[in-house]
Image (cartoon, helix red, strand yellow):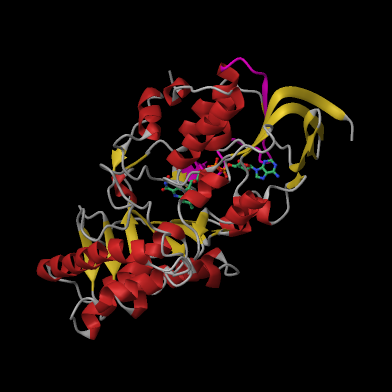
């Protein structure tokens, strides 16, 4: 196919990492073209405004605003934020209504005991993870941590269950499939916040003034003696350097072929990451049937195997709405179900807890990130055998012309919007060959 255009640098993907990289490289005086398969920017930051409601179908939270570049960018771009510190699956950081395995409410004392047990085990876990075999799973280290406590079966089961559900909600995989180091990065510094006007304002602001070509599906990226050749369904682009930010699921699927293939170290790191199964279910109701003032609802025990946590979106907008997740096993099992079947399945559990008075929702949103060809899942988790630094191996420049970026390349805080943004900043520095301030993104 003929070359339709050339640029100093081509960026593949207009998610937060690609837009951050492109913005800084353009600011550095280079001519940048961004090629994006979708008909919109933002990638996995995607706000739905249908039916007069604002729903973030992808990322919602900044998991801790202390020293967060995304919080700084949001302030500079004038994006309102609302505190909602439950996104890290904390057991009791904010008011939550808990139900036990029989569907009875837990007393405040019982909640305190439960949360204390979790903290006690998680303290032991840090040491155990540091000494674990490289290929240990998160489930194995949790088991070892539980062994250090002389508790009865039920008490241990609740903490085991908590850790499994945390792995599901944070990484979209049960703890037996996650590497022992898979939650190392999962700390929350400061309050968590969400965006009542939509997270996509971040992407729109980052994209302002950039040359973004939407609906350009890239199929291959080839390194040649002259630089790089990027093939799309709308012709070929030539550039000196390329930044590739497609999700690892897209690379695994071979949808963007890299030629010659990536170096061995990159291929090894890529093989240690997998896209997860993690979907959102948002239910809107005519009226609230749960307690006012709580941040969420949790149920313990087997009935909560799939639907264990609901978050009150009334914190963002003045409306009775709950968010739950099909996370890990639930997302895999319900992948072929209709939206109606999924919603009905969540309602069975809500009615078990709140009775038959729970009405049908007035509307519902069910996401389908697993079936999205341009993400193939929600974000990457670490397989047994990997450590956080493996992510960063992916970002090592290849032959001085090819740079990978994106959430899965940022070891300190992968699977997040800040990780994506910082990976774009690093790619821009590697392209320009000098240090630049991340604050140049919003200055
Ligand atoms: C349901 C869900 C909930 C989440 N919750 C949170 C949260 O609360 N907080 C948080 O920090 N993070 C969250 N995340 C993760 C966060 O959204 C991502 O880590 C981040 O947005 C990734 O940005 P990125 O630039 O790396 O990738 P992307 O946003 O995926 O950008 C890559 C771009 O490449 C494009 N692309 C793919 N294939 C091609 C191709 N062949 N040709 C051209 N373009 C292509 C894609 O369309 C996309 O626009 C969530 C994600 C999901 C899906």
The quadrant in which residue 271 appears is bottom right
Q: Find the residue positioned furthest to the bottom.
A: 153
The quadrant in which residue 33 appears is top right
Per the picture, the main secondary structure of the magenta-coloured stretch is: loop
124 left or right, relative to 260: left
Residue at position x 74%, y 41% from top? Answer: 217
The quadrant in which residue 230 appears is top right
> x, y percentage for residue 356?
32, 74
Rendered position, 93 above or below 211: below
Asked whether 170 or 244 is in front, the reply is: 244
Quadrant where the N terminus is found in the figure: top right
Asked whether 160 or 286 is in front, the reply is: 160
116 left or right, relative to 240: left
Q: Is residue 341 visible?
A: yes
Asked whether 399 or 217 is in front, the reply is: 399
| The image quadrant in which ligand 1 is located | top right
> x, y percentage for residue 377?
57, 56
Q: How many marks?
A: 0
> x, y percentage for residue 11?
65, 32
123 left or right, relative to 172: left
Rendered position, 29 above or below 195: above
Residues in magenta? 28-53
Quadrant where the C terminus is found in the figure: top left
Residue at position x 51%, y 63% from top? Answer: 383
**Residue 223 in magenta stretch:** no
Q: Is residue 355 visible?
A: no
Residue at position x 29%, y 46% from top? Answer: 84
> x, y percentage for residue 187?
32, 50
**Residue 52 in magenta stretch:** yes
50 left or right, relative to 254: left
């Amino acid at each position: 196919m003929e070359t339709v255009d050339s640029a100093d640098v081509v960026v593949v993907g207009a998610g937060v990492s690609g837009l951050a990289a492109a913005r800084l490289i353009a600011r550095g005086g280079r001519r940048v073209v961004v090629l994006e398969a979708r008909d919109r920017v933002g990638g996995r930051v995607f706000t739905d405004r249908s039916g007069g409601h604002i729903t973030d179908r992808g990322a919602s939270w900044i998991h801790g605003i202390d020293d967060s570049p995304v919080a700084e960018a949001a302030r500079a771009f004038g994006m309102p934020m609302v505190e909602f510190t439950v996104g890290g699956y904390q057991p009791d950081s904010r008011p939550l209504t808990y139900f036990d395995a029989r569907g009875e409410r837990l007393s405040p004392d019982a909640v305190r005991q439960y949360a204390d047990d979790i903290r006690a085990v998680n303290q032991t876990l840090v040491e155990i993870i540091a000494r674990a075999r490289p290929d240990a799973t998160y489930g194995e280290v949790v088991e070892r941590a539980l062994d250090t406590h002389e508790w009865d079966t039920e008490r241990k089961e609740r903490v085991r269950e908590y850790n499994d559900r945390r792995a599901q909600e944070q990484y979209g995989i049960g703890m037996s499939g996650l590497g022992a180091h898979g939650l190392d990065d999962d700390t929350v510094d400061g309050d968590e916040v969400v965006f009542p006007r939509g997270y996509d304002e971040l992407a729109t602001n980052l994209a302002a003034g950039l040359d973004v070509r939407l609906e350009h599906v890239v199929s291959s990226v080839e390194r040649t003696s002259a630089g790089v050749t990027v093939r799309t369904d709308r012709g070929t682009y030539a550039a000196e350097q390329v930044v590739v930010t497609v999700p690892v699921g897209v690379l695994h699927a071979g949808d963007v072929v890299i030629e010659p293939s990536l170096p061995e170290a990159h291929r090894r790191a890529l093989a240690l990451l997998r896209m997860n199964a993690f979907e959102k279910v948002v239910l809107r109701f005519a009226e609230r049937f749960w307690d006012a003032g709580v941040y969420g609802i949790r149920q313990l025990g087997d009935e909560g195997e799939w639907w264990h946590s609901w978050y009150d979106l009334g914190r963002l907008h003045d409306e009775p709405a709950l968010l739950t997740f099909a996370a890990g096993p639930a997302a895999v099992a319900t992948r072929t179900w209709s939206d109606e079947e999924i919603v009905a399945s969540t309602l069975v559990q809500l009615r078990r807890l709140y009775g038959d008075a729970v009405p049908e929702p007035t509307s519902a949103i069910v996401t389908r990130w697993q079936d999205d060809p341009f993400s193939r899942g929600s974000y990457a988790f670490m397989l047994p055998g990997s450590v956080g630094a493996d992510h960063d191996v992916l970002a090592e420049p290849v032959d001085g012309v090819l740079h990978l970026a994106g959430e899965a390349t940022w070891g300190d805080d992968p699977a997040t919007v800040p990780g994506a943004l910082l990976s774009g900043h690093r790619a821009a520095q590697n392209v320009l060959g000098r240090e630049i301030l991340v604050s140049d993104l919003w200055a």
